[in-house]
């Protein structure tokens, strides 16, 4: 694994994500017995192997595990990153900001800050949904840093 180039690792991660997404009723089992051990024991820890596109793929895995977002964040936290535009779009069309506002805030905080105005508008929309669901998060430093982005 450590000898593989980042683009090859991304392809592997994409395949894992597709398998997880298509695992249906076995999603939790696949997560616990395949994905978590793979990330924990096999995935390269060197930062050079984990570029922004890899960080986005890890964010997609977190979204796929939305019902267990906190667990997914714990496992993938150090690998998250990249342009949040697509993730923001998916979050704005989902119930996750309302069902797991803290997890969504953490996910967004771990990603790069948006650079285009559309993404900033989507970020504001998602942040409002987050604090609408859990008003205490309006006092969270991560929330304030993201609002200032």
Image (cartoon, grey):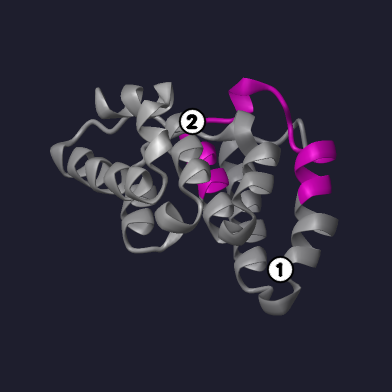
Cα–Cα gap, marks 1 and 2: 24 Å
Q: Quadrant of residue 14?
A: bottom right
Residue 141 location (% of width, % of height): 41, 21
Q: Quick one: quadrant of the N terminus? A: top right
Looking at the image, the residue that sits furthest to the bottom is: 25
Q: Is residue 53 visible?
A: no
Residue for point 24% across, 23% down: 148
Residue hosting label 1 = 27
Residue 100 location (% of width, % of height): 51, 52
Residue for point 54% across, 39% down: 54
Q: Magenta stretch: dominant SS?
A: helix
Relative to 20, is 72 above or below?
A: above
Which sits in the foreground, 78 or 105? 105
Task: Provide the residue span drawn in magenta.
Answer: 36-59
Which sits in the foreground, 102 or 146? 102
Residue for point 62% across, 41% down: 73
Residue hosting label 2 = 110
């Amino acid at each position: 694994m450590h000898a593989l180039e980042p683009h090859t690792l991304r392809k592997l991660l994409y395949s894992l994500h597709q398998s997880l997404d298509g695992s249906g009723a076995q999603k939790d089992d696949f997560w616990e017995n395949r994905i978590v051990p793979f990330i924990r024991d096999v995935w390269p820890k060197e930062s050079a192997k984990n570029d922004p596109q890899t960080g986005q793929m890890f964010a997609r895995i977190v979204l796929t595990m939305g019902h267990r977002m906190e667990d997914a964040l714990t496992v993938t936290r150090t690998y998250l990153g990249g342009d949040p535009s697509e993730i923001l779009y998916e979050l704005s069309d989902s119930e996750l900001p309302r069902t797991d506002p803290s997890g969504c805030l953490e996910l967004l905080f771990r990603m790069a800050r948006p650079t285009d105005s559309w993404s900033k508008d989507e970020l504001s929309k998602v942040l409002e949904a987050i604090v609408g669901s859990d008003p205490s998060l309006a006092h969270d430093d991560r929330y304030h840093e993201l609002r200032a982005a």
